[in-house]
Every structure is written in structure tokens, then in C-alpha cells.
Amino acid sequence: MTTAPQPEVLRAPLVVEFPFTRSLGPVQSAFLTGLRHRTVLGVRTTDGKTLVPPVEYDPVTADELRDLVEVADTGTVTTWAWNPEPRRGQPLDTPFAWILVKLDGADTALLHALAAPGPDAVHTGMRVRVRWAGERTGAITDIACFEPYDGGPGQTSPAPHTGTFDEDPVTGIVAEARLDYTYSPGGAQSRYINALADNRTVGERCPSCHKVYVPPRGACPTCGVATTDQVEVGPAGTVTTYCIVNVKAKNLDIELPYVYAHIALDGADLALHGRIAGIPYDQVRMGLRVEPVWTEGGRYPDHYRPTGEPDADYDTYKELI
Amino acid sequence: MRPPIRDIAVVAFAQSDHLRTTDEMSEVEMLMPVLHEVLAATGLKTADIGFTCSGSSDYLAGRAFSFTMALDGVGAWPPISESHVEMDGAWALYEAWTKLLTGEADTALVYSYGKSSPGSVRDVLTRQLDPYYVAPLWPDAVALAALQAQSLIDAGETDESALAGVAARSRAAAADNPHAQLRGADVPHGDYVVNPLRTGDCPPIGDGAAAVILAAGDRARELCERPAWIRGIDHRIEAHSLGVRDLTDSPSTRLAAERAGVFERPVDTAELHAPFTSQEVVLRKALRLGEDVTVNPSGGALAANPMMAAGLIRIGEAAARIHRGESRRALGHATSGPCLQQNLVAVLEASEEASEGENR
Ligand SMILES: [Zn+2]
């Protein structure tokens, strides 16, 4: 047993990507379908205001709103912020201004981007108009951005609109997102991962209750204190429980069915999980003694196989199930 | 407001040092020393705590249910009474306060933490925006704050040099705060990040954790020489659409303050969760804070802004001033969402007033 050394910090890229598919209500559907048709719709509130972008429920009264109107594609900047370094996903890849713009006929402002040569060319109160995207799909990005516009307000009283257009309405959007992280597992898990690189499995002992946790996470959940003492466990262990997997996971090159088990490595007070091979799937049993099989260059045991020892007595592992 | 049905106080507060990166520590490893410190301050053990509530966000770490790992640091076995909010810990404190009000528990441990260093927090925060009309444009957190700052400048309520003054005062105040990430009068105001906000107007990005212990009535008096009695807490939210709101004002803060009882008697200290200099201008107005009120003696979020903990830290810092006898009536504020969308206000008082309150 040794006191756990401070490991070198491990780092790996971690990408989280998700395409949320979202359905639209009647007002949002009409608005996004309208954008596809170069038409900007708002919604009338019960007190006669026009909200653009439109919402289905009044943010003040919570009244249901369905009364659609068409507003202009020109408007006035109500506030702005110059963005010298556009970031991934933003509407323009050259420096631009973020603006809140009140379209002619609307009483509230829409957030979007303004194409302008520099911050000196932007001011609150300036007139702007929509620059439509060449290809429009029924999304807020159908407005490519806004651009400066010389004209004054034209038609400022919004015209009633049915909200229906010729073709299929847009009924949903896919909200694509990608976030990039650099994952660092912290002290205890770094020590665990580093040991695996040497084909060793290490746990950490709680200084208070003396349980050995594998894999260690840095804390004893019973005592709420740091696990500090490093303990080498295994290599052999006992199957405490198992299941037979009959469904093939994507990109997994393992013949079905296979066995996935909880394995209490010798010296550990917590079972970890692993695949059992080298024995017919229907002969795996609780109490089976197994050992890890490392493949060339593998960073964790590929699977566990029977050691050939007699099965462990139930009483020796029942606490770990 | 109606007096609370039980007297509840903040009896201990602890926080980590707030650092730009803490790669060598997992969340639970970062959190555990803070939990031990706050428990040690009261002599309580995990088993003595009646209710535990935490705040954090999976989006910061990029991993689902990351708070369950942090629970290991609490000692959640044998089973404890526990809850979590995917928000700043100030809202976890609110939940714990209501739990104590019900009488189901006499003590509560509240903690929160955030590691912003693994990802890009400016981008991560875009995912809390309206997914239909706003999030697809990826407006980052600084951009949205800059729109609010420009509104204030246009309205004549501040200018860039006044904002620089807020930044300088905050970081100078943080010189005495050993936990702060950016401190001292010589922090440069820097270049524009998104005009009109410069680096100095923006909070540092970093990792950190905080914890608070609440206790009711006599239990609080046993655990702490000068409990910081919570006289009221309230939180309010505004419409998510920025174009519907008046960005120069914060009606949600004002209403929360009114319901929490802020305006009944003057406060001497205010810990405001204003990550951007311009937001302090808005909050001072909403809370009607005069020049005689000590604002952010800790340095505030401009000195350290660990996501999900910075709001809880404001309440903790306000309480700690009362514990030390430096304040008699203090305000703690927390915010969430873009441009001060949601706001929580707590009023804390020293024991002299508390003893009068006993017989209400
Ligand atoms: Zn233990």
C-alpha cells in the first residue's frame, strides 16, 4: 500500500453533439414558414401590441396568442454590440454587430446580426433591413443577417395574415449543437487510468472505513472523505452477478450473445464491470473466478476469462453484489 | 412581507480558491475540502445534517448527471435527504430554506460548484437560450451582456469610464479576499471583447465551489455565535425574449427585493451577483442602493465567477460579514440567465434584530 502520488494531468478531447428535434406550435410554425417565404410575421397581444418574434403565450398576461400579422423586413436598431471576433455558429464569419432590431410595425425587438464595416458605422436608431439567405429552410437563420438601409419606415401598421402559405408548413426544427471540451478526470481517476496503462488495476482505500474502491473516484461515499491510499487489486476476481446480452451495440465487434458481469477483484470492496469470454455464455455463473485479458496496446482489459480455480464461496462476495 | 414561520440562519460559509483551471482535480475532489471546512466550522457531521441540497450544471462539465459523482463527497450512504437544482447554489439555498420552514429539518447543507475550464463557457451558455429563435445564432454570454451595456450607455445611465470604475473598485476590494481569482487595483481594463465591454468589464472564467450551512432557531444559536438570520428570500424571472424586456432595468430584482423585505429598513452591505460591470449599474438602481451601502466588499463576481457557485457565494459573503460583526443587515443577490433574466434576493440580519423577532 502506498500513498497515492499526484499524477500528471491527463487530458482528452470530449465533444458533445446533439441534434434536438423540436416540434413547433401554430405561431412558431407560421413564423418560420413565413421566413422561408421572405415574410416576417408577428403576433398581436390582447392589448394590441405586436410581438416579433412571435410567441404563443403573452409574456405578461399569459394569454394565448394566435392573431398573426405581417410586419416589414425593415426596422430600427434599439441596441447593438460590436463583435470583433465571430465565434463558431454565429451568423457571419467576419466582424459584425449584434443588434436588437424593432421591425417596422412591431413593438418588440428581434435579436440578430448586422453586417457593417466597423463599429463606427453602427448606432442605436439606425435603419436596417433583412438580408435573406439564398437557401431558406424555415429557421431563424433564413435571415442571413441585417444590413444598413437608407429608407424610413414604410408601412408601419401591421397587416393581418392567415399564417398559411402554399406549401407544407414548417412543423419542426432540428436544433443542432456542438460543444467542445477538454476532459480531465482528476487525481483518483488519473491514477487509475495510468495504472491500467501498465496492465495493473489500482483502487484507493478510505482512511476512515478502510473500504477499497475500484475504480476510485477520489471520495468515499459512505464517509465523505478523500480516498488517499493506493492499493493494487486483482488481477483475479469473482463474478458477483452477470447478464447475457443479446443486442448488438453500434460499432461493437463482439459475437452475440455475450456476458457482461460485475467482477469483484481480489482486495477490492466494490465490483467493477467487464465482459466475460473464454467460456460458453450459458456456463457463466455467480462465484466464477476470472482474470483480465489484456490485448496488445489495450488501455483496459479487453475481457475477463476463467482462471480454472474452484468457484468462490457465496459468503466471500455476497456483500459486494 | 409576512415574517417567516421559523427563524432560519446561515451559520457557516466556506468556499474554495477560485482558479482558471483545476485540471488535476475532479469536481468531487475540488468540492470535498469546502464541505469539510463548512462542517468543521459548526462541528456537525454529515449524519447530523437534516437536508442537503446542491446546485451545478452538467453543461459545464459536458457530462450527464455529473452531480451524482459530487455526492460522494457528502457521504450519501447511509441514505440522506437530498435534492439538486440545475442552477446556481443560491436556488439550492432557497429550496433548503423552504425545507427548514416546513419543520422537517433543523439543519441543511447547501453546496454548489462549477468547473468552467473544460469547455468554452461563452459558448456553453448559448445552450440556455430560446432554442427556436436565439440559440441557432450562438450569441455568446459576453455579446448579450454587451447589448445590455449599450442600452445603458444610450440611456445615459453610465459610460465606459464609469464601468471601468466599477471594475477597478471590485478588484481593489478583492485584494483582501484570498479566494478571489482576479484581485488588486492593477488588473488591466484591456481591449474590447464585444464593444462596449472590455476584458475588465467581464468576469474571470474559472472553477470553484462553495458551501453554506443553514440552521433553525435554537440550533442556529448553538452552532454559531452570530447567526446571519434570513429575514426574507424571494426570486423572480422575466420573459426569456430579450427584445421584450427593458434591458436598462431589472423589475424582477426589484420585485424579489420588495417581497424579501429589502426596502423595509436600509441595508449596510450588498453582495450583488453582477458578472458584468454594467449589471451592477442595473442592480443598484433596482435595489435603490445609496452610496452609503458597501457593495461587494468581497470583490463580487468580477473578482471570481465560478458558474453555479457565484450566487451562493454572494449570500455566503453577506452572511460572513454578519458572522464577523461587520454588518448588521446585509443583502445577498444571485442571478441566472442572460442580462439578469432571473434574480434572487435574500435579506440577512444580525442577532440583535433577531431576538426582537423571536416573539412576533
Ligand atoms: Zn469510508
Image (cartoon, coloured by chain):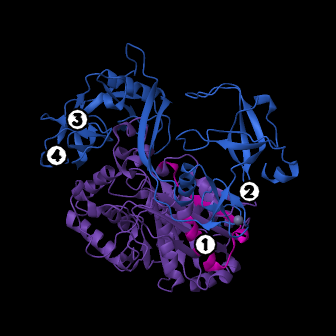
What's the amino acid at mark 4? Val
**Labels 2 and 4 within one chain:** yes
Badge 4 element: loop
Is residue B264 visible to the viewer in this orientation of the structure? no
In the image, what residue occupies the spot 47% across and 85% down?
Answer: B326
Residue B349 percent location from the top left of the image: 54, 79
Q: In the drawing, does residue B286 fall left or right of residue A21?
A: left
| Residue at the extreme top of the image, as rendered | A166
- Residue in the foreground of this view, choosing between A70 and A172: A172
What residue did someone put label 3 on?
A: A146
Q: Colour of chain B?
A: purple
Residue at point 56% right, 55% down? A189
Task: Determine the secondary structure under disc 1.
Answer: helix
User: Are tags 1 and 2 found on a single chain?
Assistant: no
Q: CA distance from mark 1 to mark 2?
A: 24 Å
Residue that numbered label 2 is attached to: A269
First in residue order: circle 3 vs circle 4: 4
Q: Is residue B12 above or below residue A117?
A: below
Residue of label 4: A122
Magenta-tinted stretch = B31-59
Which dot marks residue B151? Answer: none
Q: Which residue is mark 1?
A: B36
Circle 2 residues within 10 Å: few <14, some 14–19, many ≥20: some
Which is more foreground, mark 1 or mark 2?
A: 2
